Every structure is written in C-alpha cells, then in structure tokens.
Image (cartoon, rainbow, N blue to C red):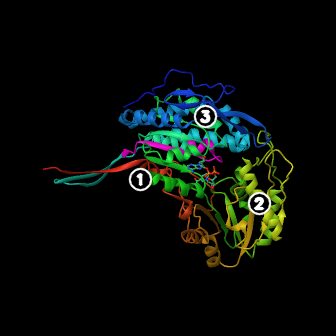
Amino acid sequence: MNAKPKLSGIDPKVDFNGPYRMLIAGKLVDSNERFEVYNPATGDVVAMAPSGSREQMEQAIAAAKEAQPKWAALSWEERSAYITAFADALEANKEDLITLLTTEQGKPRHSMASFEVNYGLDWLREIATRRLTDEIIEDTDQHLVKVAHTPLGVVGAITPWNFPNLLSVWKIAACLLTGNTMVMKPSPYTPLGALRIGEIAVTVFPAGVLNIISGGNEQGAWMTEHKDIDKISFTGSTATGKKVMASSSSNLKRITLELGGNDPAIVLPGTDYKQIIPDLFNAAFGNSGQWCIAVKRLYVHSSQHADFVRDFVDHCKTKKVGDGMDADTDLGPIQNRMQFGKLQSLFADVKDKGYKVEMGGTIDENQKSNFVPITIVNNPPDDSRIVREEPFGPILPILSYDDVDEVVERANDTDFGLGAYVMGPDVGAADKVAERIEAGTVWVNQFQSHGVDIPFGGHKQSGMGVENGRAGLEAFCNSKTYITRKK
Ligand code: NAD
C-alpha cells in the first residue's frame, strides 16, 4: 500500500519570533506560569517558556490515551508516512531549529548544532522504512507459533539538555512508528526546541498522538507515577534514573533508562596515535564534553604517554571556546549554571589536590556566561574525583598504564558502563581487549558512530534496555505469542 501522509493542511512553517506554546491534544496552548530560558553564551534570558500545570499534564496524558487505539489501528505504512511527513515539516524549519539549538544549548551552529538537526532528519526518514515483522517460531502441518509485537500504549518521554533535538527525535520516531502515542517533557534548561517541534508536529500528526509539555522536574515525576502511562523512555542522569525506576513500579511501567557514563578510551601500545588525535579530541570535547559517551578517561601506554600528552595538548591549543554563533568557535559554553557549578567544584578539587594540569585549569568566576576552558590533567590518581566522576565538561584526565591486563581492570573499575573505546595497530588484538570491557558499546578504532539499526544502551548503572535497532523498536512493544493448532 502506498500510504499518503495525512497532513492537516496547516503550513508547517513556524514563526520563530512568536511565543512558545505547548502541544496538548492537538492544540498549541500557553500556561498561567512561565519560566526563564537562558543563552549560556551570554547569560541573557532568551525567552519565557510555559510551565505546564498538573491539570495540563492530565489533559496531555488523557489525549494520548484517547488517540492511541486509532493510531495503533493504522498500518505501519501509514504511520511511516506520517513520520516522513514530520521530517519534511521539520526540514521546512531547519535553519531556525539549528539557530534556536545554538541559542538555548550553546553548541556551535556551524558544526554540532547543524549536525544534530540534520542527523535527526536523516534518522526520521531512515527509521520510517523499518518494520517489526512477526517472528515465526514453528510452522508445521500441526502448529503455527508466532511472536508479534503490539504497542504498549501511552509513552512518557523525558529528555536531557545535552542533545535536546536529536534525543527527542529518537524517542518520537520509534514510539510513534510502533503504534504508541506520546507525552514528552524536555529538560527545563532546553525546552524551546522541543516546543517548536511541537508547533511543527501539530501540522502533521492527528490530535493527541504527540503531546509536548514544558516545565520543571516535577513534571517528570507526575509522568512516572501516572497510571495511564505505560512506559517511560528516559534519558538523563543515573541519579534521576533511579528515581524514575522506583516511581515507575506503581503500575509496573516498562522503562528504558539511558543514563550517565564515565567512558574509558584505551590507546594500545604501538598505536600511530598522531593520526587519531583529531578524532580523540572530538570524542572527548565535542559538545564541550557534555556527551554521555564522551571519552572521560584516556589511558595511554607508558611508552607513549609523555609524547602523546605533548601532541594532544598542542592540538587542543588550536581550538577555540566561544559563542556558538561565531563561525570560528570549536566548543561552546556549558549549557547551564547547575552543570557549570559542578565543574567549578571539580576544577577546585584538581587545584586543591595539586594534580598536574597541562592546559587550562582555571574557570573565570566573573562571567555571566558559562565558558569553561579546555583542560588536560596529566596522570591524576585513579581514586581522584576527575577519574571517578562523570565531569560532563571540557576536562580530561590522560592516564598512563603499563600492561593491558592492568588497564582493562582500571577501565572496568567503575559503576558506569555506557561506552568505551579501544585503539590499536592490530584490530584483532584491539577486539580482544574490547571483549573484556564492561560497556554497552565499544568502538574499536572508531568513534561515537550510531545508526538506526544499531542498538545503544548502558551496562551497570549506565542504563537499562536499549534505544535504536530492532531491540529499540521492540522496547516500545509487548511481545505477543500466538500458538495455533492447525488441525
Ligand atoms: P537529569 O537526570 O538531571 O534530567 C533529565 C530529565 O529528567 C530532565 O527532563 C529533568 O527535568 C527530568 N527529571 C528530573 N527529576 C526527575 C524526576 N524525579 N522524575 C522524572 N524526571 C525527572 O539529567 P541532565 O542533567 O538533564 O542530563 C545529563 C545526564 O544525562 C548525564 O548524566 C548524561 O550522561 C546523561 N545522558 C545520557 C544519555 C544516554 O543515552 N545514555 C544521553 C544524553 C545524556
């Protein structure tokens, strides 16, 4: 069947100068209360965002519940056509979405912000071609045993502030494609992009299929405890993930938790490290280190450690921290004051303990903005805060090791297990090391690639379940088994 997108006929082009409104039950609505949203590069208020009330949350959940059976009754082809139409509608507003992302999040417009929005568009169009086909377990003269996948119902999506556009798109795409409806709550630090996505989505989806409501952290708790939400798709910190898990038990909600990490990267002996320094820089400092899978501990063999540190620092010195709207900015500011404060505390600890700092190390305390310098800490102890904690900023410890067994043990000595990196001249040997690393994804001689068909999730306290890939689609579904006697 060649399904046609059911567009509402409203022009998808949004007035980016207009007020920000929430999407509830197919209508764009304001709220009695509003809160300030800041530009982290200037410290100025960008806009006021509506703070949805509990009553509005109830309306959004009720609308999602009402819309779900009809949405699920559509064919995959029809839902897929809506997802493609959504990509087209977002594309019509692409440049404004990119500018807004830089303005509220801080990431450079010409690189990270453009990448994030464009990648999201590609993602929507690609995932729209995927299907969860039934699995035939047995098909004999006597029996047919098959496993099908039915939607869970209403999904609550809770997102963080580091990749607010892409992580919203990931959740919306997989959730709606599989026949669920959604209530989404963006981070209070970056609500604007999600609200504009809602203003665009209203021109595409039937009322109630996608609802977007902004406000404070309490809204997340309203969702996790609500009896009419069947699943929570959460991306955020491990601390909040634990609260989500506890609260979701009230009605045994399904949960997918994409949480924090403290990702190790191991440069094996004999690596021609000079050629990977630019990639390693991006993997550690891209998005100013505010990346769940950022390289956060870099282990280099003692035979190369000193040379590596020298060359890596030289490379870092060519990079500029600045306003993301400037074309020559490589790294933007830290997105919010809370995270900025955490980094101030980590920087103070590095200074107090007297660890060797090769570059950076001092945050300007007299700024309205949130700029943090690129900072390299040379071989701090394994029990230092900068090695044990997830810094989520542009600071990296480069650690020396003597043998592979030792470095594997040190890399795994953490409660986190999100991503990891192994680089080496012999791919087979690097793969063997990767097999021993406790992490949801290990990139071998490669960095931070994702894909619609590639499952992504954390081990240990970095998460539960996966997003993306077939398993990511299945995570939005019940497994339903049919056992039929044919005669
Ligand atoms: P956070 O946990 O503070 O907030 C995430 C979201 O949870 C926000 O929308 C927030 O409003 C909401 N929230 C807060 N309290 C809640 C509660 N009690 N119940 C329900 N929701 C609640 O995280 P953050 O600071 O926004 O994001 C940074 C963290 O996210 C880092 O640890 C990072 O590693 C992690 N992260 C993980 C991934 C991944 O895919 N594994 C991706 C991006 C970010």
Identify the residue under disc 3: 195
Please say whether residue 319 is one of the residues in the magenta stretch: no
Judge whether residue 455 can be spotted in this image: no
Q: Is residue 194 above or below residue 246?
A: above
Q: Amino acid at mark 1?
A: Leu
Q: Which residue is mark 1?
A: 252
**Residues in magenta, as a range:** 150-168
* Cα distance in 3D space between marks 1 and 3: 29 Å
Badge nearest the viewer, 2 or 3: 2
The crowding category of the residue bearing disc 3, from other C-alpha atoms within 10 Å (few below 14, some 14 to 19, many at least 20), is: many
Find residue 313 and report its horizontal and vertical position in percent. Answer: 81, 61
Residue on which the image places disc 2 = 345
Q: Quadrant of residue 170?
A: top right
Measured from the top left, where is residue 139 in percent x and y?
23, 53
| Residue visible at 78% across and 65% down in the picture | 349
Side of 359 relative to 8 (left or right): right
